[in-house]
């Protein structure tokens, strides 16, 4: 692996295509290839291409290839598409093994069996992203260093072959020194950096835009690193928290430190009489929600207490949690994410079936019902069984599905002066069963009271800084690379002529215009776009 | 205010429409004074009309904003209209860089189709649901739309490249796919035409049907049903009995609209072919005779370069900020988010292929076309077909 | 020169590889992470049973504790309760204590349940779900076996057979 010494005296690393200093073509293959030079990476030696010995080198070279990088991008793209065909697991509200088949038939079943229901959380999707990350690091390292060296080593005076084979090139035989001076001034006015050597001139600007891609890659790497941080325990908290109105609940994952009291949940809808502008839209939609809000109080535990013990709490703050306006404290955010309405209490009236006369009302809390309700005058009601979420189980026995009072049912014993041993009655919503024959009394349903339960999301994301930083750096890099161009104009004296050659990494149209403007009012000929000339020749033929 | 707003939009639409004629004229005229970069009289009128139209549409946007008290980008109609406006704006900017009216001839029809498509959605001013009540919404949506619009310019330039560059004398895969693109544009026109006709006739028919949870429901069609709902029963007298009915998990009404649009598109396309007696792209070829391939290639690439950062900022970064505020997480794999990511990945691949693999010219033009297809898919299909948090209520 | 290149490349690849493996592993492990794992000291708590007696876990040092989380509505809980009761009566004199924690239900429901199944061991209601949170229980029934030193010996979710209950109690017998 020797280094290559160019005739201009510069020593280039092995694998260099164009001499870093003067631009002479060093690679014989390249010499023969085409009329115009391939200026990618300045013809510098990409390390990966030159050494290919050990397994480490082979892995390195694999990830260094842009081809591999593009394939990774394309594969990720295709995988991402697959995941949008059906809703992902987190957006469905049934067990996935049931949901997909029920909603989408055999296709849904297949989708589920292939594991596409959680595609973005699958190991292979993660692996694709991770490989993109690896590729980003290695690709960038492999290119930015040689490119930096080549651009640093470049000399003003260039090899003839290098100039001739630039895309924009032209010569002028009749010129005056005044012309050159004028051009130089014009170039300066256009903020070119000018270097001179033996009457040759190199005007360069926007070199920093060449670093754009690498800067944005660094941003992406930091972003991905931020994503990875989430896997570290404690960095990322994402919990649901349901709090009934009037109740206080422990905020999960805060080290048993914080409690949230929900004073009130408010649901507001737009009023078509008040919000006249929206009248039509409201009529079309029926009802449009204006606001979801929970008025909460945040408490912090003041003394050490064990779980189950009544903690001493101190109010930290009051807040109205709304969508888009989370409550934040101590690195945590509490978001208003949903709500539901739960039955809170039921009111019955103990009624004589014959006379239809009520002997008294009783209100039963569905969250914490009492077992006895004394109505006076020898009348009382006892709850024998309570099923908050009533159903008949597999053995046709009455039972409860959950502890939430979605469908409350009771077995009552009604005690009256006429029936001091009591009468048994099973009461559920819209049905009454009298298992031991006809009763004298009944529990007639009088009313129901509901209470709202606010659904919150508790979130802490300590990786956010990396995500934000990565995003900012990415944007800087991508703007730097996209909105600026690296332009170089060589004006050199060769064989008694003035040669003008120019190169830009993009936006040739702009470069040509700039050159035209710079050599205005001089004898110099406008250099030609050799690529276009070539094409026109072909198109003409 | 709302009335003024709609009038301004209508004016803008007409001005854009008229400007196309002048763009056409400017190309024809150019043949006479070849080689000069200056825009001729026709071209100047065309660009002026475009700018006046743009100002009118800006007026629509501002007056509607005042009326609604929020930026009008919150439903399908408003967003798509804004996208059309951004496309015109992006064209104006690119025009002043490259001064080619030919680009206008290809961009303006696309913009008009987009605005016409937008107006097929309910046009009344909608109130904002809580999640949308954030200034980040306005920043995110507008920036994303502007980014997509600039990227769409690269589609217009790519299309010019393909129309000019592809040999139309023989049938090939390339001529076929280019014609598919042309047909898709005609099909959008078909959709607009069919929807307008039925809505002008105030067509309605009602079905009772059984949804996927075995519930009975009624469904109101605003076009005659070719595709009927699952176990549908026609309730309206004199309505069309559907030719086929589909399983419950397919939205029959939307599919019916798609079928009608395709029929409309095919009819229009056949008429156009009968008039032209050749492929649309072949008929367009003389118009692009004077443009240099290299030049449009550069416009196309430049648009991607300008649009990509704007798109990233709007559709990903601002989107993440908003999502973080509204839904408590900056990224949730919602279909719309994923499609923004897909668009972004696609253009990232585009840039890498171009920079490192030397995909210039025709390949690059095809990529620009595919990129636009992805953007349109994200706008149309993801909102209407793939349900998610973002789906605006549309018909 | 060549050596240095190889070393640098190897180091970079190793760092990247480690990051990738860690991410994949954590993603996988996150699904079945456990807050209170075997060999951890069981988090202390205080709850009041239906008779009004306070039970503090750390007061049972020196005894084995069979800590069971349950609900009256959960069918497997109903099945295993009689087994636990039987074995409790066998083992209570051998230094095994049963603490049975109901998750946020009404006293009425719990009392009715105790009456119906004639449960002898102390039953308490975790009305604020604090103990459940401390033990990160998400499925019922869940059983923690705690030895005489207060360490978690085993964690089991799902229905128990009488045999299992016996083996479990045998395990924590001091």
Image: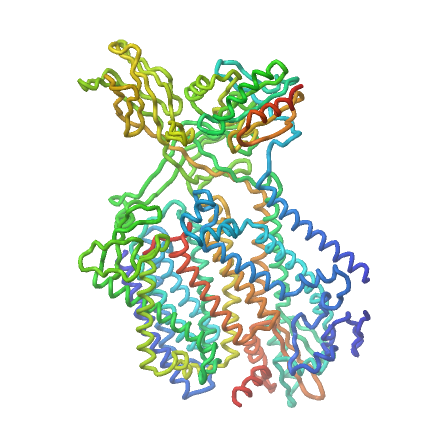
Which image quadrant for residue A350? Answer: top left
Which one is in front, A398 or A491?
A398
Residue B13 at x, y = what percent?
A: 31, 67
Above or below residue B134? Residue A200 is: below
Which one is in front, B4 or A531?
A531
Above or below residue B313? Residue A33 is: below
Residue A213 appears anywhere in the view: yes
Q: Is residue C3 left or right of residue B385?
A: right
Residue at 36% across, 57% down: B76
Residue at 38% across, 85% down: B29
Residue C128 appears anywhere in the view: no
Residue A440 at x, y = what percent?
A: 23, 17
Residue A284 at x, y = what percent?
A: 27, 50
Residue A164 at x, y = what percent?
A: 67, 83
Residue at 26% across, 45% down: A272
- Tell me the colour scheme of the image: rainbow
């Amino acid at each position: 692996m020797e280094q290559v010494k160019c005739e201009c005296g510069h020593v280039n690393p092995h694998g260099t295509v164009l001499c870093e200093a003067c631009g002479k073509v060093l690679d014989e293959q390249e010499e023969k290839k085409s009329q115009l030079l391939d200026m990618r990476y300045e013809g510098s030696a990409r390390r990966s291409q030159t050494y290919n010995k050990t397994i480490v080198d082979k892995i390195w070279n694999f990830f260094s290839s842009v081809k591999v990088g593009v394939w990774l991008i394309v594969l990720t793209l295709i995988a991402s598409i697959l995941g949008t065909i059906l809703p992902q697991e987190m957006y469905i509200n049934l067990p996935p093994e049931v949901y997909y088949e029920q909603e989408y038939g055999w296709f849904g079943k297949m989708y589920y069996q292939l594991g596409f229901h959680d595609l973005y959380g699958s190991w292979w999707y993660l692996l694709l992203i991770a490989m993109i990350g690896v590729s980003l690091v290695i690709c960038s390292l492999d290119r930015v260093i040689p490119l930096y060296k080549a651009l640093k080593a470049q000399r003003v005076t260039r090899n003839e072959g290098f100039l001739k084979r630039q895309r924009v090139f032209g010569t002028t035989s009749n010129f005056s020194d005044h012309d050159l001076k004028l051009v130089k001034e014009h170039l300066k006015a256009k903020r070119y950096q000018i270097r001179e050597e033996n009457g040759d001139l190199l005007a360069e600007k926007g070199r920093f835009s060449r670093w754009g891609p690498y800067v944005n890659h660094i941003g992406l790497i930091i972003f991905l690193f931020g994503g990875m941080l989430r896997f570290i325990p404690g960095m990322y908290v994402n919990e649901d928290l349901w709090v009934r109105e009037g109740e206080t609940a422990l905020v999960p994952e805060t080290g048993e430190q914080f409690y949230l009291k929900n004073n009130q949940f408010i649901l507001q809808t737009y009023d078509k009489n008040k919000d006249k502008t929206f009248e039509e839209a409201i009529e079309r939609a029926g009802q449009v929600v204006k606001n979801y809000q929970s008025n909460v109080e945040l408490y912090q535990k003041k003394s050490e207490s064990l779980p189950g013990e009544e903690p001493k709490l101190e109010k930290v703050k009051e807040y109205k949690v709304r969508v888009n306006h989370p409550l934040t404290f101590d690195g945590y955010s509490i978001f208003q994410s949903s709500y539901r309405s739960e039955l809170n209490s039921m009111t019955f009236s103990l009624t004589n079936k014959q006379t239809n006369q009520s002997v008294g009302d009783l209100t039963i809390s569905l969250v914490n019902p009492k077992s006895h309700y004394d109505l006076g005058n020898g009348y009382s009601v006892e709850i024998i069984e309570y099923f908050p979420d009533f159903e008949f189980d597999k053995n046709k026995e009455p039972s409860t599905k959950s502890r939430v009072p979605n469908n409350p049912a009771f077995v009552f014993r009604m005690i009256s002066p006429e029936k001091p041993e009591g009468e048994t009655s099973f009461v559920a919503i819209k049905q009454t069963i009298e298992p031991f024959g006809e009763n004298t009394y009944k529990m007639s349903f009088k009313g129901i009271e509901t209470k709202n339960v606010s659904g919150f999301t508790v979130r802490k994301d300590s990786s956010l800084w990396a995500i934000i930083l990565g995003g900012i750096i990415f944007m800087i890099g991508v703007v730097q690379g996209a909105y600026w161009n690296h332009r170089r104009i060589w004006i050199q004296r060769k064989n008694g002529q003035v040669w003008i050659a120019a190169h830009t990494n993009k936006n040739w149209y702009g470069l040509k215009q700039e050159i035209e403007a710079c050599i205005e009012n001089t004898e110099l000929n406008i250099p030609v776009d050799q690529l276009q000339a070539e094409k026109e020749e072909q198109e003409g033929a | 205010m709302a009335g003024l707003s709609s009038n301004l939009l209508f004016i803008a639409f007409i001005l854009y429409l008229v400007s196309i004629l002048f763009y056409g004229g400017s190309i024809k005229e150019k043949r006479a004074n070849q080689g000069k970069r200056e825009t001729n009289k026709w071209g100047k009128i065309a660009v002026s009309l475009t700018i006046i139209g743009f100002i009118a549409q800006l007026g629509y946007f501002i007056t509607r904003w005042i009326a609604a008290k929020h930026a009008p980008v919150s439903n399908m109609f408003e967003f798509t209209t804004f996208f059309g406006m951004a496309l015109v704006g992006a064209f104006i900017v690119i025009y002043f860089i490259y001064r080619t009216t030919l680009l206008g001839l290809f961009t303006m029809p696309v913009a008009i189709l987009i605005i016409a498509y937008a107006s097929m959605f309910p046009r009344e001013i909608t109130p904002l649901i809580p999640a949308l009540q954030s200034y980040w919404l306005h920043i995110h949506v507008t920036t994303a739309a502007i980014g997509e619009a600039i990227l769409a310019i690269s589609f217009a330039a790519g299309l010019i490249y393909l129309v000019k560059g592809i040999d139309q004398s023989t049938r090939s895969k390339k001529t076929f796919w280019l014609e598919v693109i042309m047909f898709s544009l005609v099909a959008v026109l078909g959709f607009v035409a069919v929807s307008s006709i039925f809505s002008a006739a105030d067509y309605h028919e009602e079905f009772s049907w059984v949804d996927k949870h075995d519930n009975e429901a009624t469904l109101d069609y605003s076009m005659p049903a070719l595709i009927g709902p699952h176990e549908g029963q026609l309730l309206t007298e004199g309505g069309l009995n559907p030719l086929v009915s589909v399983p419950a998990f397919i939205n029959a009404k939307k599919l019916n609209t798609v079928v009608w649009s395709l029929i409309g598109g095919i009819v229009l396309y056949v008429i156009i072919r009968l008039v032209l007696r050749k492929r649309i792209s072949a008929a367009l070829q003389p118009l692009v005779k004077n443009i240099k391939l290299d030049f449009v290639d550069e416009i196309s690439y430049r648009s991607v370069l300008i649009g990509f950062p704007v798109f990233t900022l709007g559709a990903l970064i601002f989107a993440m900020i908003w999502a973080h505020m509204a839904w408590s997480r900056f990224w949730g794999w919602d279909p719309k988010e994923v499609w923004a990511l897909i668009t972004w990945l696609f253009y990232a691949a585009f840039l890498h292929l171009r920079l490192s693999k030397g995909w210039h010219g025709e390949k690059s033009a095809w990529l620009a076309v595919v990129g636009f297809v992805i953007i349109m898919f994200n706008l149309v299909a993801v909102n209407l077909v793939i349900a998610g948090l973002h789906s605006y209520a549309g018909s | 020169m060549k050596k240095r290149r190889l070393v640098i490349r190897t180091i970079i690849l190793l760092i990247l590889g480690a990051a990738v493996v860690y991410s994949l592993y954590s993603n996988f492990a996150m699904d079945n992470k456990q807050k209170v794992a075997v060999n951890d000291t069981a988090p202390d708590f205080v709850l009041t049973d239906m008779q009004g007696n306070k039970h503090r876990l750390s007061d049972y040092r020196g005894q084995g504790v069979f800590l069971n989380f349950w609900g009256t509505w959960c069918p497997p809980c109903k099945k295993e309760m009689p087994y636990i009761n039987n074995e409790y009566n066998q083992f209570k004199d051998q230094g095994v204590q049963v603490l049975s924690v109901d998750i946020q239900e009404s006293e009425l429901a719990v009392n009715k349940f105790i009456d119906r199944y004639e449960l002898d061991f102390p039953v308490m209601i975790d009305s604020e779900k604090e103990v459940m949170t401390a033990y990160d229980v998400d499925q019922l029934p869940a059983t923690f076996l705690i030895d005489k030193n207060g360490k978690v010996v085993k964690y089991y979710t799902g229905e128990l057979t009488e045999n299992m209950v016996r083996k479990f109690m045998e395990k924590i017998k001091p």
